């Protein structure tokens, strides 16, 4: 099995060297746990490593992502100019105002088939190997009921797997919840679930990651301390934190 290097420091060693190629994975966690940073790091590292990537953003406007991610030294605009990253603006559906992005949705309303068409067009254009969907709850806002959201996610994951790309889908959970996605179904369509936690303990904040599921992989079952710094997300081995 071919494995895709995530680009997240310390992560690939926890999953036998990388993410199984051509599959879909869920990055799950509460608000501010680092899902968007994790997903962007995956795309930027791929882009720098000969694996172009698509970022479908339904949550944050592309301009803000480009700006925020500069903090980590990731020049998305430049990688876009080099044809290594393509952002698709799916936020339009949320506010109903036209986008000036090359890849975007019509202001007339949300249309799943149009989203999928734009995704496939973008994949073809830059020969993408990686895709990020950020986020499922934001996608879900465009549907009347959970059944339709599930159908939409299933269709999307099916098409992405047919296109042979490796995909991260972000989704939101509340801390302590047993579900890994807001709709309680995303985990069934994903080949793996990565969970990010953020807990304040006393005056200290505490970020951790654990791998809830990774098909075809002997993965770590520990709760790993993680850190967000100038380089993005970095994962520590459990022992490191107890080292003197
Ligand atoms: N340069 C930085 N150094 C350290 N921590 C940072 C830095 N930039 C952002 N963070 C942390 O990362 C968090 C944002 O991460 P991110 O946007 O990936 O979260 P998210 O899980 O996608 O949240 P949301 O649910 O809002 O989409 C911030 O709230 C902050 O705690
Ligand atoms: Mg986010």
Image (cartoon, grey):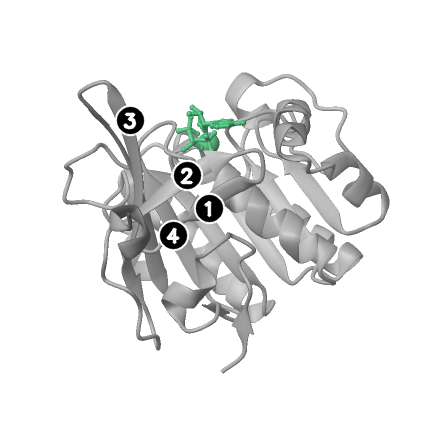
Which disc, if any, is residue 38? none
For disc 3, the marked residue is 205
Q: Earlier in the sequence, mark 1 or mark 3?
A: 3
* Cβ at disc 4 under 8 Å from ligand 1: no
Question: 10 Å neighbourhood of mark 1: few (<14), some, or many (≥20)?
Answer: some
State the image quarter where residue 126 is shown.
bottom right
Mark 4 secondary-structure assignment: strand
Whether residue 210 sits left or right of residue 67 in the image: it is: left
Q: Nearer the viewer, residue 198 or 178?
A: 198
For disc 2, the marked residue is 227
* Cβ at disc 2 under 8 Å from ligand 1: no
| Pointer 1 with pointer 2, Cβ within 8 A | yes
| Pointer 3 with pointer 2, Cβ within 8 A | no
* Cβ at disc 1 under 8 Å from ligand 1: no
Q: CA distance from mark 4 to mark 2?
A: 20 Å
Residue drawn at point x = 66 percent, y = 39 percent? 88
Mark 1 secondary-structure assignment: strand
Which disc, if any, is residue 26? 4
Mark 3 secondary-structure assignment: strand
Which disc, if any, is residue 234? 1
Please identify the residue farthest to the front as the structure is shown.
244
Residue drawn at point x = 65 percent, y = 63 percent? 129
Q: Earlier in the sequence, mark 1 or mark 2?
A: 2
Residue drawn at point x = 28 percent, y = 43 percent? 181
Q: Earlier in the sequence, mark 4 or mark 2?
A: 4
């Amino acid at each position: 099995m071919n494995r895709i290097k995530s680009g997240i420091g310390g992560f690939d060693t926890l999953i036998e060297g990388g993410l199984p190629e051509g599959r879909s994975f869920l990055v799950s966690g509460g608000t501010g746990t680092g899902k968007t940073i994790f997903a962007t790091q995956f795309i930027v590292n791929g882009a720098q490593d000969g694996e172009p990537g698509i970022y479908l953003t339904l949550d944050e406007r592309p301009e803000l992502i480009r700006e925020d991610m500069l903090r980590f030294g990731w020049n998305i605009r430049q990688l876009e100019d080099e044809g290594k990253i393509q952002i698709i603006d799916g936020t339009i559906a949320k506010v109903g105002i036209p986008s000036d992005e090359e890849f975007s949705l019509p202001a007339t309303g949300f249309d799943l088939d149009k989203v999928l068409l734009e995704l496939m067009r973008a994949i073809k254009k830059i020969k993408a190997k990686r895709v990020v969907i950020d986020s499922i709850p934001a996608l879900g806002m465009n549907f009347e009921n959970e059944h339709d959201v599930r159908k939409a996610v299933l269709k999307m994951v099916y098409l992405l797997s047919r296109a042979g790309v490796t995909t991260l889908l972000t989704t939101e959970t509340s801390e302590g919840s047993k579900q890994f996605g807001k709709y309680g179904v995303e985990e069934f369509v994903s080949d793996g679930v990565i969970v990010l936690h953020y807990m304040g303990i006393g005056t200290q904040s505490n970020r951790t990651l654990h791998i809830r599921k990774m098909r075809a992989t002997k993965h770590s079952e520990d709760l790993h301390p993680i850190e967000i710094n100038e380089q993005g997300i970095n994962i520590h081995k459990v022992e490191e934190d107890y080292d003197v």
